Amino acid sequence: MKFLRWSRALAALVLLIGAAAPLAAAEKIGLVLMHGKLSDPNAPFRFISPYLEREGILIEAPEMPWSKHREFDRSCDEAMTEIDAAVKKLRSRGATRIVIGGHSQGAAAALIYAARQPADGLLLLALGHSPQTSVLQERFAESVARAKQQTAAGKGDEKDKFDDFDASKKPPAYTVRTTARIYLSYFDPEGPANTMKSAAAIPSGVPVLWVTGTNENPGLKGYGEKLYAAISSQAKKYIEVDGGHTDVPTAAKEAAADWLKTLR
């Protein structure tokens, strides 16, 4: 009788292990992939997205408030709720592990999000837009001061024109039309878009793949190295791919796929 009970227990254990194996094999990576400033969900990812999908990665590429069509129509904090919605979509599609990623300002948003919400990984492609840098503080000083004055005067939700800059665009300096409140959420160096504060707040166990281009803007690349150093995660990796700022998503597709597979 003891032998029979032992045999049944062993059989049950084998069945349990066998049932668990398919669950592990079926685990799915879901990736939120956010575009950069003045772009759209498709342009920067037209090669990397289908490549990753063929590798079994589920992707949601939402149009974010800084797109060329939306022109900062929601604040940085509100953008985080849009990322939440993309995460929920991935969960509904069967994703069991969630990676937050993006290109340029989309990468900055991914960093900010992961400093606030749990994530199973960060894919940062040519991260851009760090309003706390001395260069951008000087460039946006007048607009930030004016936006603060308008907000203090009770006009924070009235639209106006404010300065913006993107080194990868021609011309790089231009204006955006948005409210003072929204503008400050992205351009105030002490506001929620401060990427150095977010980098320092990333949990130590979160895997991070930081990708830059060999021909990246020197200032952007140099500050990116400081941001990368501020991330305390022991599971971070920094790589360079051929090309400039806008080339990174395509040039990084194989490296991104290989890295994502390690998270399964």
Image (tube, rainbow, N blue to C red):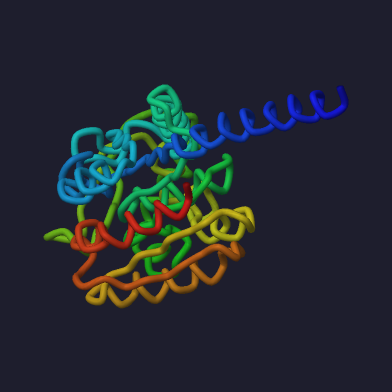
Residue sitting at x 61%, y 28%: 15
Q: Residue at the spot x=49%, y=72% of the render?
A: 226
Residue 187's place in the image compared with 18, above or below, is: below
**136 or 48: nearer the eye?**
48
- Number of numbered discs visible in the structure rendering: 0
Q: Nearer the viewer, residue 70 or 123?
A: 123
The one nearer the camera, 177 or 93, is 93
Residue 8 pos. (x, y %): 74, 24
- Hey, which quadrant is residue 30 in on the image? top left
> The N terminus is located in which quarter?
top right
* Residue 185 place in picture, x, y as percent: 46, 43
In the rendered view, tell whether residue 34 sits above or below residue 249.
above
Q: Position of residue 4 (x, y in %)?
A: 79, 24
Relative to 239, residue 77 above or below: above
Foreground: 19 or 167? Answer: 19
User: What residue sits 21% from the left and 59% below the top?
Assistant: 173
As drawn, which residue projects farthest toward the right? 2
Q: Is residue 156 visible?
A: no
Taking 138 as reference, is 207 left or right? right
| Residue 178 visible at all | yes
Task: Locate residue 213: give its quadrant.
Answer: bottom left
* Residue at 35% over, 73% down: 221
Left or right of 40 in this view: 158:
right
Q: Quadrant of residue 252?
A: bottom left
